[in-house]
Image (tube, rainbow, N blue to C red):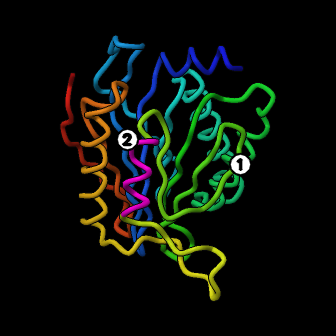
């Protein structure tokens, strides 16, 4: 597994971030796809629309990521035929966990952040490891730039301890525009320090009005 891990990280990389707010969720990822110091493409989307109010951002080995996205899309289509409705974001979160855990002995080398709105219209973010362990959080980052981004998000958004009673909400206190600005800032910082992150930033905002996509330019060297 160690050999595969080294090979995969050298082959792809990239960074994904998600922030949940009171009535929105921001999911963002860069568009660089590279092998070591060689850039294969500067315009590769790492974000997949799974449902009307649910998006998935993945970093890691692109072959496994494509297989995972295709698997989830097929299961969601079956769910729609059986129940005549789309899957909610929490249900999709559980489905993704089950799908990853099913492959735990030869896992998808994909590190995922799932974002969207829950059944109450609140923003929700689920973060995963490679074998399906997951947690609902207020914000998360995955990929090669995650170690650079998480300390900044902790500083700005750290939620109260889960041991506090009564329990506090995990959603961040920022407005939608403030969360988008923070995402732009952390990616600008990570791009300066991580060779696998750069070129362009894709920002997906999920709210009651639907899904909106924005793009901004990042460093290209």
Quadrant of the image for the C terminus?
A: top left
User: Which residue lies most toward the bottom here?
Assistant: 166
- Closer to the camera in the image, 44 or 180: 180
Question: Relative to 81, is 146 on the left or the right?
Answer: left
Residue 15 location, quadrant:
top left
**Which residue is rendered at x = 51% and y = 24% of the image?**
62
Q: Which disc, if any, is residue 54?
A: none
Question: Relative to 104, is 67 on the left or the right?
Answer: left
Label 1: few (<14), some (14–19) or many (≥20) C-alpha neighbours in 10 Å: some
- Closer to the camera in the image, 135 or 195: 195
- Give the main secondary structure, helix, strand or loop, of the magenta stretch: helix
Judging by the rendered image, the residue that carries numbered circle 2 is: 29
- Please state the horizontal and vertical placement of residue 89, each as a whole percent of the image: 57, 60
SS at badge 1: loop
First to last magenta residue range: 147-155
- Please state the horizontal and vertical placement of residue 220, each as a whole percent of the image: 20, 25
- Please state the horizontal and vertical placement of residue 68, each as a whole percent of the image: 61, 33
**Which residue is rendered at x = 30% and y = 67% of the image?**
176
In the rendered view, would you say 131 is above or below 37? Answer: below
Judging by the rendered image, the residue that carries numbered circle 1 is: 133
**Which residue is rendered at x = 79% and y = 37% of the image?**
102
In the rendered view, would you say 121 is above or below 196? Answer: below
Question: Label 1 to label 2, Cα distance in Å?
Answer: 21 Å
């Amino acid at each position: 597994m160690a050999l595969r891990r080294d090979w995969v990280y050298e082959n792809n990389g990239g960074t994904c971030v998600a922030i949940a707010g009171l009535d929105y969720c921001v999911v963002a990822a860069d568009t660089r796809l590279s092998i070591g110091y060689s850039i294969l493409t500067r315009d590769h989307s790492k974000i997949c629309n799974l449902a009307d109010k649910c998006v998935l951002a993945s970093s890691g080995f692109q072959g496994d990521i494509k297989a995972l996205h295709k698997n989830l899309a097929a299961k969601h289509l079956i769910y729609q035929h059986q129940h005549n409705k789309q899957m909610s974001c929490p249900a999709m979160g559980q489905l993704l966990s089950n799908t990853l855990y099913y492959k735990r002995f030869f896992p998808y080398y994909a590190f995922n952040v799932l974002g969207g709105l829950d059944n109450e219209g609140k923003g929700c973010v689920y973060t995963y490891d490679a074998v399906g362990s997951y947690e609902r959080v207020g914000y998360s980052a995955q990929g090669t730039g995650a170690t650079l981004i998480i300390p900044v998000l902790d500083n700005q958004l750290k939620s109260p301890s889960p041991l506090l009673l009564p329990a506090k909400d995990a959603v961040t206190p920022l407005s939608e525009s403030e969360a988008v600005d923070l995402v732009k800032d952390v990616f600008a910082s990570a791009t300066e320090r991580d060779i696998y992150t750069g070129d362009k930033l894709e920002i997906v905002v999920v709210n009651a009005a639907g899904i909106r996509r924005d793009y901004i330019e990042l460093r290209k060297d």
